[in-house]
Amino acid sequence: MALARHRATDPDHRLGVLVVNPGGPGESGVNFTFGARWVFSLGILARFDIVGFDPRGVGLSQPVRCSSDLLFGGPTSYPSSSAEFESLREHNRQLHEDCVQHSGPIVRHVSTDDVVRDVDALREALGEHKISFYGLSYGTVIGQRYAERHGGNVRAMLLDSLVDRALDAHAFVAASARAAADSFEQWKLWNTSTSESPLWGLDLDAFWDRLLERASRGELVTPGDQSSPITVHDLSSTLTAAAYGPDWAEFSSWVRDVDEGGVADAMESRRRVSDVSLSAAALTTVTCADRDFRARTFTEYKALTREAQRISPRTAGSVRGNEALTSCLGLPDADTPQHVGVMDTEVPTLLLNSKHDPATSYENAASVRRQQVLGTVLVTYEGAGHGVYDRTECTRQIGDAYLLSLTVPLDGSACPATKP
């Protein structure tokens, strides 16, 4: 297991180890730790050894490897017929066998339960009776499961941008669609309240609907690359990517360029990089080990996607919801399907979430809070974006007080939004 440590800058007043994981799944905790000085406050850096790890199958920890042609090729992930659905299932089965061939047995042992055992082995290897833990996004799944299985070994646990492990396929797809619809409304709100917007003064509903119609007819192309069409799902996924920041000015410029056939810009470059993320193999392998979201038949798939499109027609449902239904087709059943346990820690776990998060929607955090009413408190950032701890002075102060002095904030506390 690959590790990185940022040693406490005030070792005489060291509080212990803060184990960190940035989620994904597939993101490198080692790289996250190299950047710890840009994430955590000086107080946290002074009092904790920040220890990041690459979970098994990720980064430098025996990564899952697959053929790029299979990983990024294959049939459409939006099947419109039973034949296309079965073609995708067969492609995924071949991809899984390819990953096993290139990676070995690790492919069958990358579930979150496997990782949780590794985290406790890490605690023992560090010689720590208890650890503090910061998990972001899918890192909150590791944190939740660790608090269920090894709660007595937790000093403090801060979970930032929550994944709800209780959701079945229908609930996940619906929640993802609601998050996509909310991101669209947040983008509209920014444009109508920001005179510097490239789309200032436009009827954005009509403008966006026209883009969707053009995309469905194959009339939209990538700025600067006339041979690369932009689909309805490309528009939706790029909106969701922009909502992580949120980076509404950049997205609005990109949308204007797409409409006008302009030159490529930073948003387009980032979209291309995101499409070939090196963590893609780990993301699919881990989520398929953890989640039993497989649509069993084309009829079931169509019913779920039809509901998602009803919830959020302007984003065609959500890319995240569709990936959950299709990426694991043809693969073995999940090792540890999603379920709820009891997070049993001495100090309540601090949950942080944005009110308008495109990836881990606020309803996820509220649901986790209801499930763990005795062991958690929830603090809300009233604005938009993915990731809360280092977003504002208010969110950082609450997180720091909790980690440094175990000061548990009042459940239901909130931090005001700042302008994107």
Image (cartoon, rainbow, N blue to C red):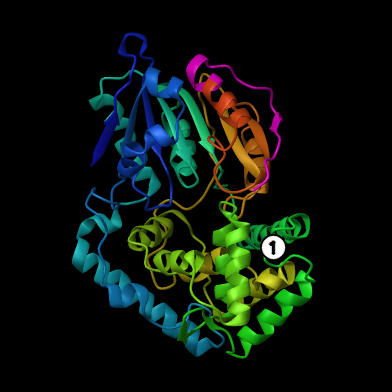
Look at the magenta stretch and give its main secondary structure: loop
Horizontally, residue 107 falls left or right of residue 157, namely: left
Horizontally, residue 95 falls left or right of residue 291, namely: left
Q: Secondary structure at mark 1?
A: helix
What segment is highlighted magenta in the picture?
Answer: 401-420
Quarter where residue 195 is shown: bottom right
Name the residue rendered at 71%, 74% in the picture.
Answer: 208
Q: Which residue is mark 1?
A: 184
Q: Is residue 258 above or below residue 358?
A: below
Q: Is residue 274 above or below residue 116?
A: below
Q: Confirm whether the magenta stretch covers residue 244.
A: no
Name the residue rendered at 70%, 32% in the picture.
Answer: 414
Q: Is residue 42 above or below residue 135?
A: above
> Mark 1 belongs to which amino acid?
Phe
Disc 1: CA contacts within 10 A as few (<14), some (14-19) or many (>=20): many
Q: Confirm whether the magenta stretch covers residue 412.
A: yes
Percent of width and height locating residue 408 = 60, 20
